[in-house]
Amino acid sequence: MRSRAAERSHTVHPAGKTPGWDKAESGVRDLRIEIVQGDITKQADIDAIVNAANTELILGSGVAGAILRRGGSEIDREGQAKGPIKLGETAITGAGRLPNKYVIHAAAMGHGPEDARVRKRPGSLSSAAIIADATRNSLRRAEELQLKSVAFPALATGVAAFPGDDCAETMLGAVREYERETPRSSIQLVRFVLFGAADYKTFLSVLNRSELTIGTDRATGQSRIRFAPLLLLSYK
């Protein structure tokens, strides 16, 4: 029997498709965003998953450790051969035994001397600026490879101690900024995979607060508020 948690789901159906509705920013394609609770190493339908990496690209604990255990040491060896990188930058490796094509390593924290000179949020090893850069650069790398789907974990909320709600706002904002700036991108789906229920609920809450668009109804000339296209799911 399936657990109640496994059956839980939340869906907001796409808006902006009804007759007479103009989006405020015409020409911006609809990028689907999914928020799920689950294991990022088991997203078999996703082209590339993002690793919450350090600047040395060493697979340690948390998401990186899960990628190492499931994907194999070849990912770790290939990543370290491409490091170190700067905070906010990314590197791409193969996916080893993972069911994906690539792993995109996004450096949202680091312990090196150069990392120490970068301004951080007090009490954290990261910042909103670093996380936003890491998110955007991950999407750019996926676009360079003409990928259609990318899965992200919450960046820098573990060892780096960046607050989950600020992380959600930063990452979701970076995705929407990328969407506006790259209307012809190959990327059709961005999935956020949160292992714990608390992070899942945080990302869901932030997305529900932010995913309103204001446009004009051509029939009446009045401003209207609609939810932007997205799909919210939860599973384990």
Image (cartoon, rainbow, N blue to C red):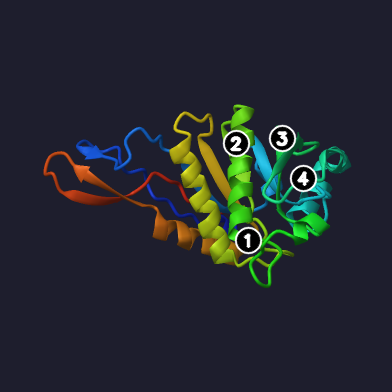
Left of 79 or right of it: where is 170? left
Dot 4 corresponds to which residue?
85
Q: Residues within 10 Å of mark 4 (few under 14, many from 20)?
A: some
Q: Nearer the viewer, residue 37 or 165?
A: 165
Which of the marked residues, 4 or 1, is nearer the chain's N terminus?
A: 4
Q: Is residue 112 visible?
A: no
Is residue 204 found left or right of 121 in the rendered image?
left
Name the residue carrying label 3.
102
Indicate whether 5 appears above or below 193: below
In the rendered structure, which amino acid carries the disc numbered 3? Tyr
Instruction: Please tell me whether mark 2 or mark 3 is closer to you in this view.
Output: 2
Farthest residue to the left: give it.
220
Q: Amino acid at mark 4?
A: Ile
Task: Judge depth for marks 3 and 4 and give the one in front.
Answer: 4
- Callout 1, which amino acid? Ser
Q: Residue 196 location, x and y as percent?
A: 63, 63
Q: Specify which label sits upstream in the sequence, 2 or 3.
A: 3
Residue type at mark 2? Arg
Q: Nearer the viewer, mark 2 or mark 1?
A: 1
The disc, 3 or 4, on the residue closer to the chain's N-terminal end is 4
Residue 66 at least partly seen: yes
**Residue sticking out furthest to the front:** 117
Q: CA distance from mark 4 to mark 1?
A: 17 Å
